[in-house]
């Protein structure tokens, strides 16, 4: 890839909340941005708000066929990817705890929050390998750290804990390919998921992701970050 070519980033769940703020920040940093959402209409509406330099595509990270279809379509249009932001996530824990949660709810959270991330990296790896300094950034949560677990959000906590584990393993596997992989805990953010009582804005939640994508030392990999500082898994 020509070093003068425009940097390109893909943001899953980039149509709202933290994902939209990440997409907006990367666009402002001069990146070409690909926004994905479960519906093409949702992705297109978000892209239209951001203007030129934004592509949109339907992609459901919990569905391998959807990932495959999106990857095939994008590979026809692009030949490299500098940044993959695995932002799409769900919080299905409502009025349940670890003693009452069903297997189905646990599996639903894992499919989106953890397994989807692994599949995204696997499927988009050829495009990432075509970049001289590719970066994978997984949007995790402090509730996925060992000292942040809570029994009242079992599927979310366990899926994010597993995501942090996947970040370590992916980092180990991709370091020889020159691809950095990190997790970010954005904090409690005012979004549809976080609710109106959250103290942080989407922009504050997105800041460290954007920094890791654009400015952070490239040698940093396999770490968990908040507010541009390393925190404990």
Image (cartoon, helix red, strand yellow):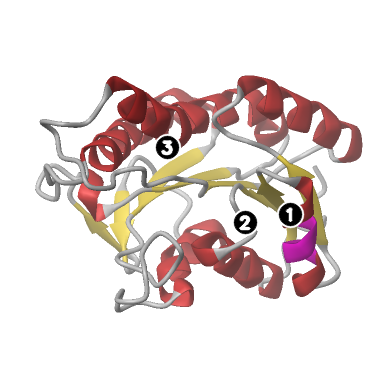
Element class at badge 2: loop
Horizontal and vertical percent for residue 189?
37, 69
Q: Is residue 204 above or below residue 160?
A: below
Whether 38 is among the magenta residues is: no
- Residue 215 seen anywhere in this rendered image of the structure: no
147 relative position to 80: left or right: left
According to the image, label 3 marks what residue?
113
Q: Is residue 219 above or below residue 203?
A: above
Q: Quadrant of residue 104?
A: top left
Horizontal and vertical percent for residue 186?
36, 62
Mark positioned earlier in the residue sequence (1 or 2): 2
93 relative position to 88: left or right: left
According to the image, label 2 marks what residue?
14
According to the image, label 1 marks what residue?
43
Separation (CA) of disc 2 from disc 3: 15 Å
Which residue: 82% across, 72% down?
Answer: 51
> Mark 3 Cα within 10 Å, few/some/many (few <14, many 20+)?
many
Horizontal and vertical percent for residue 205?
41, 68
Q: Is residue 210 above or below residue 169?
A: below
Between 164 and 56, the one lying in front of the other is: 56
Q: In terms of secondary structure, what is the magenta stretch mainly? A: helix
Q: Which residues are magenta?
A: 43-47
Task: Evaluate if marks 1 and 2 touch, with contact meaning CB atoms under 8 Å apart.
Answer: yes
Element class at badge 1: helix
Task: Evaluate if marks 2 and 3 touch, with contact meaning CB atoms under 8 Å apart.
Answer: no
Horizontal and vertical percent for residue 198?
31, 74
Which residue: 20% across, 41% down?
Answer: 96
86 relative position to 81: left or right: left
């Amino acid at each position: 890839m020509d070093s003068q070519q425009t940097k390109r980033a893909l943001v899953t769940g980039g149509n709202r909340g933290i994902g939209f703020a990440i997409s907006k920040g990367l666009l402002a940093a001069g990146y070409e941005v690909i926004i994905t959402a479960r519906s093409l209409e949702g992705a297109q509406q978000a892209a239209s708000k951001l203007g030129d330099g934004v592509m949109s595509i339907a992609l459901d990270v919990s569905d391998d066929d959807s990932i495959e279809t999106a990857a095939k379509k994008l590979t026809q249009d692009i030949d490299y990817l500098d940044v993959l932001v695995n932002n799409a996530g769900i919080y299905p824990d409502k009025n349940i705890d670890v003693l009452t949660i069903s297997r189905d709810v646990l599996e639903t959270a894992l499919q989106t929050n953890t397994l989807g991330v692994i599949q995204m990296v696997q499927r988009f790896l050829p495009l990432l390998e075509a970049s001289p300094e590719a970066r994978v950034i997984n949007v995790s949560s402090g509730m996925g750290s060992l000292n942040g677990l809570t029994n009242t959000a079992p599927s979310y906590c366990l899926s994010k804990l597993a995501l942090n584990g996947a970040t370590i393993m992916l980092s180990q596997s991709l370091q020889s390919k020159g691809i950095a992989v990190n997790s970010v805990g954005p904090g409690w953010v005012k979004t549809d998921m976080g609710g109106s009582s959250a103290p942080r804005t989407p922009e504050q939640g997105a800041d460290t992701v954007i920094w890791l994508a654009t400015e952070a030392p490239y040698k940093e990999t396999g770490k968990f970050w908040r507010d541009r500082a390393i925190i404990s898994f």
